[in-house]
Image: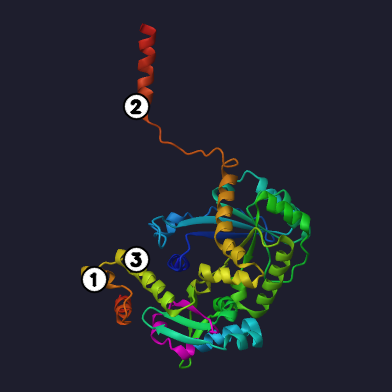
Amino acid sequence: MVRFKNRYVLCEVVSEDPRCRQCIEDRALGLAVRDAIARVHGDYGLACCSISFTVKYLNAYTGTVLLRCRKDSYRLLCSALPFVRYLESRAQRYPCFLNTLHVGGTIRTCQKFLIQHNRTQLLRLLQNCTNEEERQCIQKSLLSCSLTEEQSQSGDEEEDDGTE
Amino acid sequence: QNILTVCFSVGYSAVALNNVIDFKEKKQEIIKPVSPSELFPSLPIVQGTTKRIKVLTRLTLIVSDPSHCNLLRSTSANIRLYDIIAVFPKTEKLFHIACTTLDVDLVCINVTEKLPFYFRRPPVNMAIDRGIYFELLYTPAIKDSTMRRYTISNAISLMQICKGKNIVISSAAERPLELRGPYDVANLGLLFGLSEGEAKAAVSTNCRATMLHGETRKSACGVVYTVKKPRKVEEEETVPACKKAKTQA
């Protein structure tokens, strides 16, 4: 059966500047990644990777990004991701770097990994908690996160990260 | 200290802090390494496991003259305090000496300029047998385009000689934003000509082997490991009592 196989790369945007997270946009990120591929692999690399390249999912609170590319060229993309140095949006440059978390064949596997990852992050935040009500909040969201049909559950637990 | 917190959040389980000694300047004393407990009151826990993160100390010697190597054999007490020792040879002769006879754990490969010498197979094979690893830095590649070319060309020429064994990739990050996560660094290894399994090993198992190599160097081939035990005063008191009993009987 002929089907186009894709690879979904899950990354996290890490930056020192707290304002950087608020202005992550999908276009700015896509441009930054394409620029990095062009610098590292040249015209051929850029052309190969941009056949089916999009930013599928973006969460500004936690800085989680899901990129899609073809299975044949995902190595070019993955090897160029460490070279992303800054995000540019609204004429402002924010230095940051992308940390690759997981590469999967479908969005569903990436989502499962993301839920587990968020659960461990929440546990870590729980340890560093100082306020009692923040503690309650995190514990509640930990107990309620799971893979369901709706996307709203994963949205809830990630918003708690944003309020920290 | 910022760099270390970013390291831990990204998922590294052991970090080594580097001190670089350059011999071009006049006689330099080897300073004592900063103890990790001064930086962090309590080391945070590795993500996903219950062990604490290890912070090691490391010394890099930039040698451009055979007389500098004598420092390694000297009985300077401060050298013993470092966990890992690395050497950065500048000439072919020194590279040969470092691979065959010097007592180091890592040999750094220059990535910032064209190599003045070509690698040859005999010293590289001897280094692999002795358990010495070759180190490549990746932060210059992120910063600058010409450095990137030198990094890739030097790395690929090293790969062709050593077939991808005994490679460690590390960062010389001076700011927290120059650091990259372990998965990303393994992907960089693909650019350097390593295969996927070798690239992952370059970040994980080879580094662990280097740490163990440093430990064996500290403790007489890993067989004898001396630990200072606090003396128990009670034992000394009971011994004379027994002796008295024997003489009486």
Subunit under mark 3: A
Which range is magenta? A1-29
Q: Residue at x 38, y 85 (%)?
A: A22
Q: Can residue B27 be found in the magenta stretch?
A: no
**How far is the residue under mark 3 from the one under mark 1?**
15 Å
Instruction: Name the amino acid type tagged 1.
Output: Lys
Q: In the rendered image, which quarter is residue B124 located in?
A: bottom right
Asked if marks 3 and 1 touch (Cβ < 8 Å), the reply is: no
Q: Is residue B29 left or right of residue A56?
A: right
Q: Can residue A14 be found in the magenta stretch?
A: yes
Q: Residue at x 42, y 60 (%)?
A: B46
Reading the image, the residue beneath label 1 is A140
| Residue B27 spot, x, y in % from top left | 66, 55
Decide which of B194, B67 is in the foreground and name it: B194
Instruction: Name the amino acid type tagged 3.
Output: Arg
Instruction: Name the amino acid type tagged 2.
Output: Glu
**How far is the residue under mark 2 from the one under mark 1?**
54 Å
Reading the image, the residue beneath label 3 is A124
Q: Is residue A3 left or right of residue B110?
A: left
Reading the image, the residue beneath label 2 is B234
Q: Is residue B34 above or below residue A123?
A: above
Asked if marks 3 and 2 touch (Cβ < 8 Å), the reply is: no
